[in-house]
Image (tube, rainbow, N blue to C red):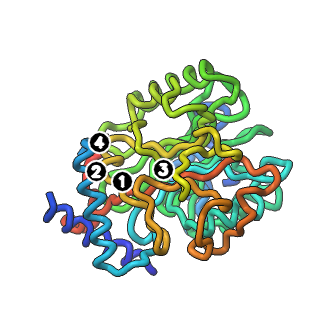
Amino acid sequence: MMLRTRKALAWTFSLAVVAACGDAATQGGSQDSGDAGITDASVSPADGAISDASHADSSSSKDAATDAFVEAAADAGKPVDHSHAALRVMAANTTSGTQQSYEGPGIRIFQGFNPDVVLIQEFKYAAGTLRNLVDTAFGASFSYYVETRVGGIPNGIVSRYPILDSGTWVDASVSDRAFVWARIDIPGPTDLWAISLHLLTTGITQRDTEAKQLVMNIQASIPAGDFLVLGGDLNTDATDELALMDLGAVVNVAGPYPVDQANNNNTSTNRNRPHDWVLANPGLDALAVPVLIGASSFQNGLVFDTRVYTPLAEVSPILSTDSAAAGMQHMPVIRDFMVESPADGGADAADGL
């Protein structure tokens, strides 16, 4: 379906709510040594690195939005293709093999879910350029931002929608990656700020320090009225870890959490730790809706594991062996948000922070 189909369902949803209630080519100015240049003339070279081929805070309001979305989807006729109903955000540290690089399994997982915004870790591609990877996994019209550094495991952001600005904030606790951010022109008047994270594995105290530093950057840099989503591989061992409590100052960290079809919210390869997250600020979190995939619905988002998910035909071309591939890092997390409203020709259904 085309984007007009996505907007049509979004309009139906909004009415129901009312009724119910790159590989960087140019080195530019930088915020730290990890910032890259740009390849899109629409973005100032001092703003960060972009590659573009084509160049309600309460639980009751959230429940009302969810109910209205499900009703709207039913009225439109299920099964409903996930990405044509809402803004889909994915957190992905799904490299495999021995080089911490994206290979067939991780690429197929991207293709099967067709996300709009990806908070991507270990953003490397041994088989070619990152532009080649993005074209293959998402499409030639997608933009991306990746921090520039020699070696390491860089964070990045991939987007269906234009990246207006981007950059990095220094993670003082680690030298091989940074906090990566992008301001994205999603449909409607409210911009989305996306932040890709890869916190340390060394311990709770270290992650707590990283989270506190990140919160200070967010509070100093992101306008209160904008949407915010952050996440990726936080390496957290529990849902009440100190780092998550720190992040609660800017995003909703309370459950219920995304789960797989076995009701398991853990995302580590052996499925015993909640390492990976997609977390939204109150304005965006209030617009969360079920993740719809074919005839399947996941009320609070999906943790995807090919060893658990059925039927895999809903997410072709993913293979049953992909989540168990040698060197596979973690399971991806997917959440959907209804951000469009027909009343103002595609404006957001709620304000941000």
The image quarter containing residue 272 is top right
The reply, left or right, for residue 1 in relation to residue 74 is: right
Q: Nearer the viewer, mark 4 or mark 3?
A: 3
Position of residue 129 relative to residue 283, above or below, is below
Q: Earlier in the sequence, mark 2 or mark 1?
A: 2
Residue type (three-letter) at the residue carrying disc 1: Ala
Q: Amino acid at mark 4?
A: Gly
- Residue 176 lies, in percent from the top left, at 73, 33
- Crowding at mark 4 (Cα within 10 Å: few <14, some 14-19, many 20+): few
Mark 2 = which residue? 62
Q: Which numbered marker is on residue 258?
A: 3
* Mark 2, secondary structure of its residue: helix
First-in-chain label (4 vs 1): 4
* Horizontal and vertical percent position of residue 70: 32, 67
C-alpha span from label 4 to label 1: 17 Å
Write down the quadrant of residue 248 in the picture. top left
Q: Categorize mark 2 by other alpha carbons within 10 Å: few (<14), some (14-19), many (20+).
A: some
Q: Which residue is mark 1?
A: 288
Q: Mark 3 or mark 2: name the one nearer the start of the chain.
A: 2
**Proximity of marks 4 and 1: CB atoms separated by less than 8 Å:** no
Nearer to the camera, 329 or 145: 329
Q: Determine the CA span between mark 4 and mark 3.
A: 26 Å
Q: Nearer the viewer, residue 193 or 89?
A: 89
Q: Which residue is mark 4?
A: 225
Measured as percent of width and height from the top left, residue 152 is found at 76, 38
Residue drawn at x 35%, y 81% is 77
Query: Which residue is drawn at the image coordinates 68% and 60% (left, top)?
Result: 307
